[in-house]
Image (spheres, rainbow, N blue to C red):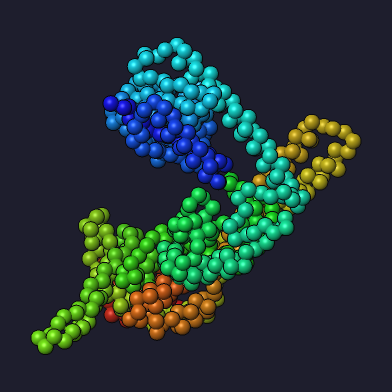
Amino acid sequence: MPQTAIIYIRVSSAEQKDGLGLERQKTKAFEFAAEHSWHVEKIISDEGKSAFHGANMLEGAALHQFEVEARQGLHKGKVLVVEHINRLSRQGAKQAAQLIWSLNGFGVDVATFSASDRHIYRAGDGGDMIDIFKVVILADQAHQESKVKSGYTKATWEKRFAAMADGTQTKPIPHTPTWIDRIDGKLVLNAHRTAVLNEIYDLYINGVGIHRIVTILNDRGEAGWSTAVNRSKNGWFYSYVWRLLTKRAVLGEYVTGDGKTIAADFYPQAITAEKFNRAQVALSMRKSNRKVPATRNNSLLTKLVYCSECGGGAHYEETGHRDQTYKRKNGEIAHYRRQRYRRLRCDRARRKHNCDNPTILKYDVIEKTVLDELLPRLVDRPQEDRAVKELRASAAELARQIAVKQQQQSNLLDALGDSASKAVMARLAALEAETEAQQNELEAKNKQLDVLLAAPSDKDDTALIAGLRAELESQDDEVRTYARGRVNIALRRLLHRIEITPYDTFIIWPDEDTWWRFDENGTLLDGEQIWRAA
């Protein structure tokens, strides 16, 4: 009976681009298995997993899963076919040897088929010395090769970054954004993709969730942009749209993987700074971005209502919102709209978990109170957002400290003269490092401030809500869901929170210092206005 073989193939992210590495390994592996009359059970692969950093041995990787299954005895008597030891590990001789011996110990042979490493490490050989030396030598060679390549790659990128920063980079850079074409050596915006990119931003800013955006693009047959092998054929994905909404490359910036901005205008700008910042505001307010069925997306007050006792979120429940269809005796089809009930209560109290707030309020009363009673009071609210104030003050203080340190550096340079005091030089170096750190912090704060200032004004938000009032109860699920999503985002900018109290009342906080209390019917009881009049 022929031995069962499982083929393992791996490519790093650098090899993954054209997919040829996968096909070559697969073809050679099948040829090698045929030579030994092995029956190939399946192929497992790790695409874009680095063996130098051990990514293919982490949870979620195919090789990791295979080892777990082998440990459970699921692959005893089989052979793992791989091109070279370096496909298993590039972390050094010890790690590679341990992996192969571990698999051998679980009854799995390991076979390599490259010209330089054509060998079968048998499970029953009991640790043959030739095998041991062979594994150690080949694994160490693989580790040293990867170390050299890693150093070379790092040096190459450091040189590129320096050229980008001073504007002298002319050679093509890997991973050019997918909305940019290279024409005659120049980076040029792709008109169609730039239009789609702006559409994605506009939709998200206006309250359309990422899942819905993905559906819109796929429904109309918009070709995917992913550069991964065969990935673009599968249309649009949530993760890809999310990356488009967060990548600063749309502004023209080149930002490294660790968040360092190398150049502010390296690429042609596809999205305005104002639009990008508004999208970041929306992202910060919709952190979960989870998919919600159209028939469930009916609350304007999502992420706004909390319990005054335990601080937990409120539970929104809706019953009877669907039409009932039935056939009369004469065969006529009739539609009956059931009475709809919508309620809000403390979710923890509902689940009897660390809260006994008994209040259950009619959702429609709170919604009507917010829209009809409270919003008109907020239109001319003069105060600046507290977060903006604090950020401005913090940025101003940082700018002052930077100016002081720069003056100290200037004074030290003047005092240094022609002498080369080690103490002065050390102090100067320390000041330069402190100044650089504070300048980076100031840059980050200014970006945060830009995002906060990009939020629409209270007047803009109330005008938007007024313009969408007619669509909030539309019978068309698509129209209603879109309108209510936009209004929810606007309300979350306008209001701080709404609290359900244990006394059949609710309190609306437009900000942290102002409040109004209403009874279960939406009648104003007390709050800021009454307090001011007293």
- Residue nearer the viewer, 29 or 210: 29
Q: Residue at x 24, y 60 (%)?
A: 349
Query: Is 155 rendered above or below residue 187?
Result: above
Left or right placement of residue 63 versus residue 87 in this view: left
Looking at the rendered image, the quarter that the N terminus falls into is: top left
> Is there any visible trace of residue 287 in the rendered image?
no
Q: Residue at x 39, y 26 (%)?
A: 36
Furthest toward the bottom, the residue is 330
Say how many tags the image has.
Answer: 0
Query: Is 207 rendered above or below residue 349?
Result: below
> Is there any visible trace of residue 460 in the rendered image?
yes
Left or right placement of residue 450 versus residue 212 in this view: right
- Corner quadrant of residue 238: bottom left
Furthest toward the right, the residue is 418
Query: Is 14 rendered above or below residue 480?
Result: above
Residue 215 at x, y percent in the picture: 42, 66
Looking at the rendered image, the quarter that the C terminus falls into is: bottom left
- Residue nearer the viewer, 388 or 333: 333
Residue 142 at x, y percent in the picture: 55, 26
Residue 12 at x, y percent in the picture: 53, 39
Q: Residue at x 36, y 13 (%)?
A: 126
Query: Is 468 rendered above or below residue 126?
Result: below
- Corner quadrant of residue 79: top left
Residue 164 at x, y percent in the picture: 72, 49
Q: Residue at x 35, y 76 (%)?
A: 477
